[in-house]
Image (cartoon, rainbow, N blue to C red):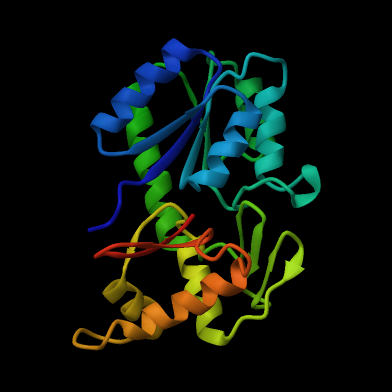
């Protein structure tokens, strides 16, 4: 069963944000709420979102600046955003100029705040479109861990990691959802391409080697075993 779609809601108004988050959660979405741009970056690193909802950040042009950051136009690529992340701006009114500015900054959609049923429909449409068109992110960051899927390079704290092919594939697969616990048999199917009936010991041996390479001094800090289930990143 597919996990609930992850939405990052960024809004400085705690009452409005909480009310909207509750409505979205009731409709089956997993919602993280950020009050500031820095808080949004932190949450995006911990739980990569599938869609961003940008409300009023309380400062002039703050929403547009965050949109430009999400689209990779600032911070020299150091921010934790997938550049293809769908972004919907919740405006404070029906000013066409506000909508035009949002689109020019990188918004995928714009809607005045308060129209929840229309918002729900547009969120669903954006997620469907993203699911059918977007490829997995080429660059993945989890804390100090950086992975480039295209060049098949990985580094930790800017130090290159010497990984074998399946060790790299295992790390990349888990890093795309860093807080999720992956079952051993699921990893066998997704990383190794094996069906049911295969031994899960191969997952254990690769996870053990990967753990030692990620943290040779304090083995177990990065690749964590969940007893009776499988593995996850820290």
Q: How many marks?
A: 0
| Residue depicted at x 73% and y 59% | 157
- Residue 61, given in percent of the width and then of the height, sits at 72, 21
- Residue 23, given in percent of the width and then of the height, sits at 30, 25
Indicate the quadrant where residue 116 lies. Answer: top left
| Residue depicted at x 64% and y 75% | 150
- Residue 171, given in percent of the width and then of the height, sits at 52, 70
Residue extending farthest to the front is 217
Does residue 16 appear in the picture of this structure?
Answer: yes
Indicate the quadrant where residue 184 lies. Answer: bottom left
| Residue depicted at x 27% and y 64% | 229
Residue extending farthest to the left is 197
- Residue 129, given in percent of the width and then of the height, sits at 42, 53
Relative placement, left or right, of 178 versus 116 is: right
Q: From the viewer's side, name the closer residue of 118 and 151.
A: 151
| Residue depicted at x 71% and y 39% | 68
Relative placement, left or right, of 123 versus 198 is: right
Q: From the viewer's side, name the closer residue of 82 and 147.
A: 147
Indicate the quadrant where residue 24 lies. Answer: top left
Q: Is residue 182 above or below residue 98?
A: below
* Quadrant in which the N terminus appears: bottom left
């Amino acid at each position: 069963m597919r996990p609930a779609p992850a939405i990052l809601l960024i809004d400085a108004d705690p009452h409005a944000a909480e009310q909207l988050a509750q409505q979205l959660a009731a409709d089956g979405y997993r919602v993280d709420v950020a009050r500031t741009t820095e808080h949004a970056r932190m949450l995006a690193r911990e739980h990569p979102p599938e869609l961003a909802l940008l409300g009023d950040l309380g400062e002039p042009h703050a929403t547009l600046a965050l949109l430009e950051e999400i689209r990779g136009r600032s911070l020299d690529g150091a921010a934790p955003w997938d550049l293809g992340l769908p972004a919907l701006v919740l405006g404070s009114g029906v000013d066409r100029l506000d909508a035009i500015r949002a689109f020019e900054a990188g918004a995928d959609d714009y809607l005045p705040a308060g129209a929840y049923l229309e918002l729900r429909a547009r969120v669903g449409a954006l997620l469907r479109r993203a699911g059918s068109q977007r490829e997995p992110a080429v660059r993945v960051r989890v804390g100090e861990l950086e992975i480039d899927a295209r060049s098949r390079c990985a580094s930790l704290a800017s130090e290159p990691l010497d990984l074998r092919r399946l060790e790299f594939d295992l790390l990349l697969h888990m890093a795309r959802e860093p807080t999720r616990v992956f079952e051993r048999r699921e990893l066998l199917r997704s990383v190794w391409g094996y069906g049911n009936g295969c031994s899960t010991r191969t997952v254990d041996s690769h996870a053990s080697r990967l753990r030692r390479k990620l943290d040779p001094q304090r083995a177990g800090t990065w690749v964590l075993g969940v007893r009776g289930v499988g593995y996850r990143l820290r």
